[in-house]
Amino acid sequence: MNDFPAWVSKPPAGPEPAVRQAAERRQQELTKPPGSLGHLEAIAVRLAALQGTQAPRVDPVRVVVFAADHGVTSEGISAFPAEVTLAMVQNFAAGGAAINALARAAGAELEVVDAGVIQDPGRLGGVIPQRVGPGTANFVEGPAMSTDQCVAALDVGRAAVDRARSAGTRLFVAGEMGIGNTTPATALASALLRLDPVELAGPGTGLDEAGVSHKVKVIRRALALHGDAGADPLETLRCLGGFEIAAMAGAYIAAAHDGIPAVVDGFIATAAALVAVRANPAVADWLFLGHVSAEPGHRRLVAALDDTPLLDLGLRLGEGSGAATAVPLLRSAAAIHREMATFAEAGLT
Ligand SMILES: Cc1cc2ncn([C@H]3O[C@H](COP(=O)(O)O)[C@@H](O)[C@H]3O)c2cc1C
Ligand SMILES: O=C(O)c1cccnc1
């Protein structure tokens, strides 16, 4: 047992088997050669089953970017300084980041949540203050978070989903911003998949080979310190995660509880998704993998979640960028299922 609240591990309802079967039948009856819309058909069937309707829709889509800092940045594990997290939060507020453009292009609403940037950004338009602390502790010296902080960070994600549900959101995208966060994501993945970090660590924002080797050593020290935390996914999250990573994990779980499918982004988001699925396996039904990132360890994480990413574009940004880029595909899949005529309706035999 652990000290985490019951909602985190409460199983969500699953997709409805009868609706799924009817959706599979409908895909056979639509005016196209069976199977000719390839993966779009499978996506449409999944969306229909999750939403319990033969008229699936993704709009309104909401992207929430959770931002936070990481004590482990003092070990020199990123190509960029921690101050960039705050600067990027200001950039999100001003509308100038990649995710601002991509969310607009995807027809999605964008919300930014300060889950614990080192320096309080103060009142910034469009940034929701939900600060768990001024960054996590350095996890090579102790747990990244106290239990209270980890629970609070999971709740930051749940609260974002509550706001989204109140706004009628039908598809949820979580993104992250936090300089250094490929290091906690790699540490979490190493612990949960029981792999040496050398199998998973990559350049993140642009470390060279020596930088990646140093990152591997830092993560090995953390794994040695925290012993067998990997046995409990939430305890692993507390010791090795980050506020924004816990918020994303909480958001995936809460979205599943609320019947809202979510699109998972790149390496860091998928590490959060793996935590969510290990803590609450039925959450996996509600997750679409938006893309496979260029961060080398992402393929291992994707394999652990046993699903096919929608896109493979060589992206390695985060912020929800790959997931947002996949949104139009999901919208298209819903549209064919909802709008196409059947052979009978079209009078074709
Ligand atoms: C300007 C800038 C914008 C970003 N947007 C996302 N990230 C991405 O890079 C960071 C993780 O990489 P690492 O672990 O190597 O620091 C995260 O903030 C992630 O969201 C950015 C990074 C930078 C520099
Ligand atoms: O895969 C990602 O999302 C990623 C990779 C590198 C840096 N930030 C994010």
Image (cartoon, rainbow, N blue to C red):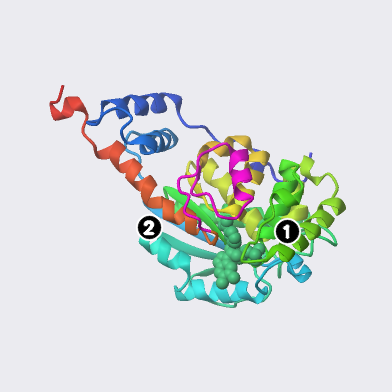
Mark nearest the camera among 2 and 1 is: 2
**Position of residue 83 measured from the top left corner of the image (x, y, whole percent):** 65, 76
Q: Main secondary structure of the magenta part?
A: loop
Q: Which residue is drawn at 53% across and 36% down?
A: 285
Picture quarter with ligand 1? bottom right
Q: Is residue 304 left or right of residue 192?
A: left
**Position of residue 219 measured from the top left corner of the image (x, y, whole percent):** 78, 56
Q: Earlier in the sequence, mark 2 or mark 1?
A: 2
Quarter of the image that includes the N terminus: top right
Q: Between residues 15 and 214, which one lies in front from this camera angle?
A: 214
Q: In this view, does 257 lie to the left or right of 197?
A: left
| Amino acid type of the residue that numbered disc 2 sits on in the rendered structure | Ala
Q: Between residues 2 and 344, which one lies in front from this camera angle?
A: 344
Residue that extends furthest to the front in the rendered view of this protein: 209
Residue linked to disc 2: 106
Q: Residue at x 47, y 54 (%)?
A: 313
Magenta stretch: includes residue 205: no
Q: Which residue is drawn at 77% across and 44% down?
A: 230
| Tag 2–tag 1 contact (CB < 8 Å) | no
Magenta stretch: includes residue 303: yes
Query: In the figure, residue 241 lies in which quadrant?
Result: bottom right
Q: Which residue is drawn at 64% across and 43% down?
A: 7
Which residues, given as a range, are shown in magenta? 288-315
> Secondary structure under badge 1?
helix
Q: Identify whether 148 is placed above or below 51.
A: below
**Position of residue 111 measured from the top left corner of the image (x, y, whole percent):** 49, 63
Residue linked to disc 1: 149
| Amino acid type of the residue that numbered disc 1 sits on in the rendered structure | Gln
Quarter of the image that includes the C terminus: top left
